[in-house]
Image (cartoon, rainbow, N blue to C red):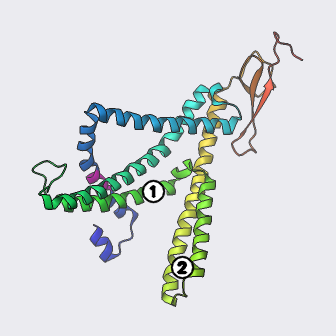
Amino acid sequence: MLVLQLFLTIESSLFEAIMFGFALAGIISEVWPKFMTLWNSLPGKAVILFIYAIIANFALASASGLVNSITGVSSGALPYSHNFALILMVPGWFFVTTLMALVSGMLIIFIYLFFLLLLKPFGVQRLWHKPGYRYVLSTAVARFVWTLGVALQLSVLAGQVGLLSEFSAESTSQLITIENETETSIEESEPPLTEEQAEVTSELEGDLTALLTDAKQKSIRYKRAQRQALASFIYEFEADSRSRCAHPEGTRVIELNDYEILQIVQTPEDEIGYTYTVEPCRSAAIGLN
C-alpha cells in the first residue's frame, strides 16, 4: 500500500487510515506477547503499575486544575465534579501516553538494532527472540520505520481532533511563534533559493503553518467544550437548588463549609454559561445579616 501511494500519488485519508491501521495492528501483535511476559513477572508488574500510578496522578492533577479554573475554589469541595473532570481528561491522556509509548518503543528498537549489529560477529543472531523467529534484522527495521510513521500519524490525528489541548493553547501559540522565528532566522542565514526551491519551500511552510493553526483552533474548541460540559455537570448535578443557606431564587449553591457557599448563576452571555461566586452562608443558625 505504501508503494502504491508513492508511485500512484494516492491522496486519500481512508487509504492512509487503512494502511497505518495495518501497521498499528502489526506493531501490537509484535509487542503484546512481550508485554504479557513482562506483566506475568513480579518486577515487570511492579514497573507497569508504577507507570500507571504516575499517569493517574498527572490526570488527577489536571482534572483538579480544570475544576479550579472554572469555579475558583478547590476541587476538594466538588468530589463528583472532580471525578467527571477526570473522565473528560481520559481521551487526551490516552492519546498522549500512547504517543509516548510509541516513541519510547521506537528508541528501544533503535538500541536493539545497534546491539544486535555489535553482537553479530560473536554469533548472536536472534537476540531476545524465539529460536524459530525469522528475519530478525529486517523485521526490526520495518518495525522501527512503521512505529515512527504511526506515531507521527497519531500526533497529527490528536492535533486535528483537539486532543493536544492537554498542552494549553498558549503552548500551541508559542510553537507557531517559534516556528515563525526559526523560519526568519533560516531565511537570514541561508543564501537565496531558486524560484523552484522557493516555491516548494513556501508550499511546505504554508502546509505546516495551516496544520499548526488548525490544531490550535481545534484544541481551543476542544478545551472550551470540556469546560462547558464540566460547568453544566456542576450546575445540574453537584449544586443544590435548596439549601440551609439563603440564596437568590434561580441560583444554585454548593456548601464549602459551615460559613461559606459557592453560588452559581446561569449567565448565557458568559463563555461557559455560568458565573461562580463565594458568598457567606446566611442561615437561621448563623444569622441572616
Quadrant of the rendering where the C terminus is positioned: top right
Q: Is residue 26 magenta?
A: yes
Q: Amino acid at mark 2?
A: Ser
Q: Which residue is mark 1?
A: 155
Judge whether 274 appears above or below 12 on screen: above
Mark found first going from the N terminus, 2 or 1: 1
Looking at the rendered structure, the secondary structure element under dot 1 is: helix
Residue 227, image x and y in percent?
Answer: 63, 42
Q: Which residue is mark 2?
A: 202
Label 1 neighbour load within 10 Å: few <14, some 14-19, many 20+: some
Q: Amino acid at mark 1?
A: Ser
- The residue lying furthest to the front in this view is 122
Between 63 and 193, which is closer to the camera in this rendering? 193
Residue 203 visible in the displayed image: yes
- The residue lying furthest to the right in this view is 289
The span shown in magenta is: 21-27
Looking at the rendered structure, the secondary structure element under dot 2 is: helix
Between 129 and 207, which is closer to the camera in this rendering? 129
Asked if the residue at tag 1 contacts the one at tag 2, i.e. Cβ–Cβ closer than 8 Å, the answer is no
Whether residue 268 sits left or right of residue 174 in the image: it is right
- The residue lying furthest to the left in this view is 132
Q: Is residue 159 magenta?
A: no
